[in-house]
Amino acid sequence: MIRELNDAFLQGAEGVQFATAFVLSYQSKLDELRYTNAGHLPPLWYRARERKWALTEWIEDEEEMSDLPLGLISGTPYTQVSASLEHGDILVLYTDGITECRNPAGVPLGIDGLLELAEGVPLGLPTSIGPALIKAVDDFRGTAPSIDDETVVVLQRLPNSPGQGE
C-alpha cells in the first residue's frame, strides 16, 4: 500500500512535492502492532514494564535507499515492522512542527528534547497525556511563534475487554 501511495504521489506531481507518513495497524486478538514509516519522525514509545520512554526502532539499510518520504523516488521499498505492545504501553506520534519548534533563544526542541518533555509528563489516559505534552511544548516555546503545524496523537494499550484474548 505504501509503495502504491508513493507511486501515486509521483504520478500526480507537478513539480517537487512529498509527504511523510507513519501507517500502523493493531490487531488486538493477535496482540500485534504493525507499522511502516515513510520518512516520518520515529514515535515515542513508553514501555510500561520498564517504566521508560524510548524511540521506536529506526530501520536503516545502508545498501538500499528505503523508507523514504512519499513522492521522492519511484519504486522505493518500505519496511513493515511488527511489534508487541504490552498492557500500559503508550505510543506518541507527532508532526515535525513539534520537534522543529524553537524556544525564545532560537534553540530547536528536537527529538531528544521531546523525549525529555515526555519523561516529565504525568502518565494517565491518552486524553490527558496528549494535552500535557502539548502544554510542555508550548512552555518550551514560550513567546517564540509557532512555525509549523503541531499535532500529537497518543495511543495506549489498555487491558483486554471481557471476551478478548489474554
Image (cartoon, helix red, strand yellow):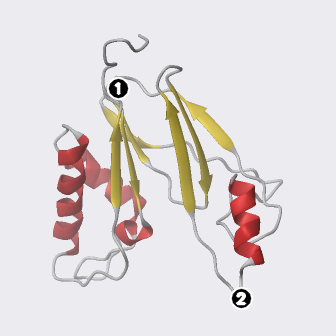
| Pointer 2 or 1: first along the chain | 2
Give coordinates of residue 55: x percent, y percent.
Answer: 45, 45
The residue under label 2 is which amino acid type? Answer: Glu
What is the residue that sits farthest to the bottom in this orientation? 15
Residue 165's image quarter? top left
Give coordinates of residue 83: x percent, y percent.
Answer: 55, 31
Q: Which residue is mark 2?
A: 14
Q: How many marks?
A: 2
- Residue 50 got which mark? 1
Instruction: Give the residue displayed 35% in from the left and 42% down from the top.
Output: 155
Q: Classify the position of the C terminus by image quarter.
A: top left
Give coordinates of residue 11: x percent, y percent.
Answer: 77, 76
Give left or right: position of 140 versus 96: left
Using the image, determine if residue 33 lies above or below residue 44.
above
Give left or right: position of 61 versus 111: right
Give coordinates of residue 54: x percent, y percent.
Answer: 41, 42
User: Helix, strand or loop at disc 2?
Assistant: loop
